[in-house]
Image (cartoon, rainbow, N blue to C red):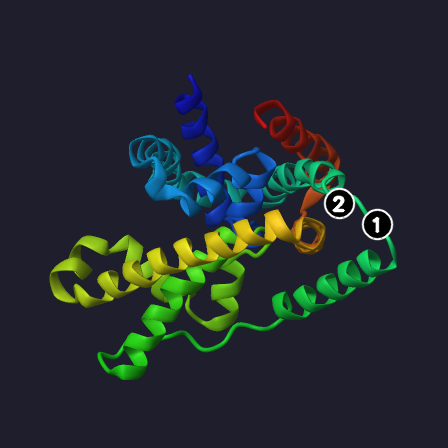
Amino acid sequence: MKYAELLIKGIFIGLGKIIPGVSGSLIAMSLGVYEEAVERITYFFKDIPRNVVYFLSLGIGVMLSILFGSKIVLFFLNYAYSPTIFLFSGLVMGAVPTIRRKIKNKNLSYVCILLFSILFLNIILSLKGGSSFVYHNNIIGNFQVALIGFLEAFTMIVPGISGTSLFISLGYYSFIMELFSNIFSVLQTNIQIPLLFALFFLIGVYTISIFMHYLLEKKEGLTYTLILAFSYSALFFMLKDAFLHSQGIFDFLSAPFFFLLGFYLCKKIE
């Protein structure tokens, strides 16, 4: 039963990676998966069989939602954008009380770090999208593919940072969507692109997980303060986006319902 639950949680995490402004890792934290996943990655080689089964269960859910759920999410984003964003905002909000409880000392330094982190992330997320990246088979092009792989790992492991929003800002979003939507043809024509992406993605996942595990063990208060700041920033942008795209009385009246539904789902499957 545990692995069936992991698969369901993986589906929600995958959906969180698809929707702009939503952080997959923050959804993972909302659902009570994050800390265990980071620890299992850090000590992966100590119990390989159990860890493989764990990540297969979680990973299958993520891949299913990305491969098949993207069309469903796209449908809802096209025809019910605001309710969809409100639903995921509720999921993110469900993690906030848990994160706050993990911060023992809410002193002046906590407030300063929280405010500075929120300000910094708001500046980053407010950056306008750059020109779209076009791959060229040279040193610069391959370096950027490696960077994209590492950034994908970074946004997947660090809670509160939306990979979709970051890649849109940097001009990499179209390249990534094209890569995954045509992965089989890319493997036949430019196999070095997915290989380079996958290599630096795996390097990033392992190294950043070790770093996050260290921070959670040695600098727990500071780490959760930063995660809380990222959560508040993500919530601000998601809710602002949902309200700006609200059309008609239904969107406004249904907003509390979908937000509370997301909050309830988070607590129910946490």
Query: Is 154 located above or below residue 79 in the figure?
Result: below
Identity of the amino acid at label 1?
A: Lys
Residue 87: x and y in percent read 62, 37
Q: Read off the residue under disc 2.
A: 103
Q: Give the number of callouts.
A: 2
- Residue sitting at 75 percent across and 42 percent down? 100
Taking depth in this image into account, of 115 and 232 the one nearest to the observer is 115
Judge from the rendering whether residue 186 lies leftward or rightward of residue 69; answer left or right: left
Residue 108: x and y in percent read 87, 59
Q: Are marks 2 and 1 in contact (CB under 8 Å)?
A: yes
- Residue sitting at 53 percent across and 60 percent down? 165
- Residue 121's tag is none
Residue 67: x and y in percent read 33, 42
- Residue sitting at 60 percent across and 48 percent down? 216
Would you call the spot at circle 2 few (<14 residues within 10 Å), some (14-19), or many (20 or more)?
A: some
In the rendered image, which quarter is residue 194 located in?
bottom left
Q: Read off the residue under disc 1.
A: 106
Q: Report whether residue 134 is seen.
A: no
Judge from the rendering whether residue 210 lies leftward or rightward of residue 46; answer left or right: right
Q: Residue furthest left?
A: 188
* Alpha carbons under labels 2 and 1: distance apart: 7 Å
Residue 74: x and y in percent read 45, 45
